[in-house]
Amino acid sequence: MTADLLALLRITSRTVKNSFLKAGRRGAGRGAVLAVIGALFLFGAYRGLGRVLAAFMNIPGVGSVLIEKLLAMVFLTFLFLLLFSNIIIAIATYYLSDDMSLQLSLPVNRRALFLSRYAKVTVNSSWMVFFMGLPIFAAYAAVLKSGLPGFLASFAALGLFLLIASSLGVTLTVFMMKVFPAKRIRDFFVFLSVAVVCALLVFIRLLQPEKLTNPNEQMLFKEFIASLQAPSAPYLPSFWASQAVFGFLSGAYYNALKYLGFLTAAAGATFALMLSVSGNIFLRGWWNSAENQLMRYRKKFFDRIDYRKYLGRLGPAVREMVIKDVLVFVRDSTQWPQLMIIVAINIIYVANISMIDLSKLPAGYSIIIKDVLFLVIMGFAGFVIASIAARFVFSSISIEGRSFWVVRMAPMTPGEFLKEKFWINFWPLLALSEVLVFLSAIFVKIDLFTCIISAVMGVFFSVCLTAMGIGLGAIFPKFDAANTAEIATSYGGILYMIFAIGYIGISEFLLAYPMHMYYTRGISFFAGTESLLWACLAVFVFLLVQAAAFALPMMRGKRALERLEL
Amino acid sequence: MIELKHLVKKYGKFTAVDNLSITVKKGEIFGFLGPNGAGKTTTIKIMTGLLKPTSGEALIGGFDIQKDPVSVKKIIGFIPDRPYIYEKLTGKEFLGFISGVFRLDKKSADKKAAELLELFEIDKWGDELIESYSHGMKQKLVMASNILHDPAIYIIDEPMVGLDPKSAKIVREMFLDLKKAGKTLFISTHSLEIVESLCNTIGIIQNGRMIAKGSMEELRASSKSGSSNLEDIFLSLTGAPDLTGVLNYISGEK
């Protein structure tokens, strides 16, 4: 079995090596850009977290407890993220991969075949979390004054934690693909989507963020400390990992080794559980998914809609492109978990916003708080829109996949094609952003003027983030991606998020002064002073930025499509 | 109708197409032959605008594919060697999509689409998702989608791959009908039988260069092998493989 496993792993390593070699100088350049951005991000995260931890540590009596609790929250977040990404990647790696048929037909050990894919799933779903460990553990090590051995030992705990998550994710995937009959494979995705929402609700309850920042006034200090010290989820591996890491970094080695023992046992148990489903159970599930491809198609709700009736005003070419995009989207069940991510992100957004109550703000701070709140809400809304756009708008060009030649052969210009992609993505994004603004206005009870400005900003954000997604999607297409998640985390996807966050930051910065003027003087600031000139200048530059954020990516994207070779 | 002038396509130091010039007149069927990796698909991709030439130009129906791609795409139909099409659409929906992007009258296009599905014997699969189609069925659907918008020029890469004998016969008949209707066909294929029986002009390409061009008679006349058979002419020009080693290997002799 070992020889087979090594042979299969060698195929993967050679594939990776060959793609690097093929990428040549351009690939090396991209790699260097990503490495620099990644290093800057990690350093920024280290410095930012370091400051937060140091501030917490300065609170007498509770500092250490607070940062321990924060670490438990981080690991709990990681656990949910990892389970979700492991399931998505396991489906693609075990059931949708092109070379699976070939490998199954070879006289290789089945378990070796299964494990080689397990290694792939683990690496692909865990690398980001592994790298995030660097700034987090380094910040904790700096605050807790731990040495290098403690820092390195923390990675042992993280490694075991990652293995547990991937074993659980793969086991769950294999089991579900076996349980659901072939023609009901879509039900699995529905199940998965519902599970994500439920997990999210449980997750929010487990986190209990209000405990960190909002101790009940009636609660005695001692009780507050006790409530913090009570573990939120003591039976989850995330808690054991956080305890092991915190133990290593704070010098509580007995506790660290105890939880490392828990993690080792759990990693062994989950790995053994996964091996037990790697034989016939996996094979039956694979047959199920293969048979699903041959099943007769049953018309669904979306097939009965007469799209042409509703899209009559559009030209025939654009109309057919829109109908094609809609049908492909609703029939691609791998998109459903992505849709659930939207729901999840929005639940988190609304849950956070609903905790803010302006009526309880201390008097005298209201202008500062309103200033900050406007920026926070719009920043948060912008970030939510950008995250969703990265998954759907940016990927909308790449999702054409290997069928893109059909579009290229159609008598339409790249400009017309991009225009269609823009409009089909713009309207849902606009609706979403306005809903977010509306919810913010209701929960936070912001005034009418701020509400109008927020709604207008929502329009600008939707226009520009859509244009940036379409443009960068055309400049960095990834037609060979196995799933949309892979497109969103590609080089172009990461660049999109960086540009999007930069754009949101600049837009907010430019509107901060006019909004501050409004909060200090009310509508009367329009009466005309020197500061009005500055406010107008800021608004003018804001509009210039919006125009550039729309036009530049669309123009560059069009040029990139004209030059694109297939 | 088709005029390729000194086409060159380089990938780094490798030259895939080397100073290639071809002229195909209206109503002609041009057979494009060559061993694997000779540059046939690259040439076709340049003609259809999927690749850009390093130098030279490709005029299709009088339009330069680089300068006026939309005008070219209005008059050509392209059948690629690998029929990747939208897997989540049904066959009928795909044809509906094509009729829309080519701005055809919906009513008559729907009628013609139904006839074409029947002609290619995939009418029973018209409401099924393309992901459940075999390679041959997808190939036939792509052919149907091209005939649907009735182009003046067909550019076809390996039309017979994945087709069963009956479908292959239908396709051959279809090519003849298109020729009779005055359409121009540029066919890249390994099927020497198709080329011999259908094509007015044959071009043989090797290492990106045209090594022979002319009618079947002209090729026979210029052939050093003296054979009248296209296979022999092709092998004498491109080099016949020495199969002794392969046969010995299979039979276990050294």
Image: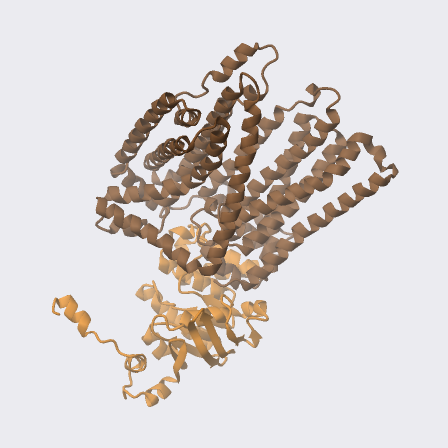
The residue depicted at 29 percent of the width and 82 percent of the height is: B236
User: Does residue A114 show up?
Assistant: yes
Asked if residue A347 can be seen in this view, the reply is: no
Q: Quadrant of residue A441?
A: top right
Q: Is residue B63 above or below residue A233?
A: below
Rendering coords of residue A112 (x, y %):
25, 43
Residue occupying the far left of the picture: B253
Image coordinates for residue A475, horizontal then vertical, percent: 55, 56
A421 sits left or right of B140 in the view: right
Determine the colour of chain A: brown
Q: Total marks drawn?
A: 0
Q: On screen, A554 above or below A58?
A: below
- Residue A360 % position (x, y): 69, 19
Which of the 4 image quarters holds residue B213?
bottom left
Q: Is residue A236 above or below residue B244?
A: above
Tell me which residue sits at (54%, 13%) in the image.
Answer: A224
Left or right of A250 in this view: A364: right
Letter of the orange chain: B
Taking depth in this image into account, of A199 and A226 the one nearest to the observer is: A226
- Left/right placement of residue A93 relative to residue A113 reads right
Indicate the position of residue A122 as horizontal and vertical percent values.
Answer: 37, 40
Query: Taking A230 as reference, is A295 above or below it?
Result: below
For the N terminus of chain A, give its image quadrant: top left
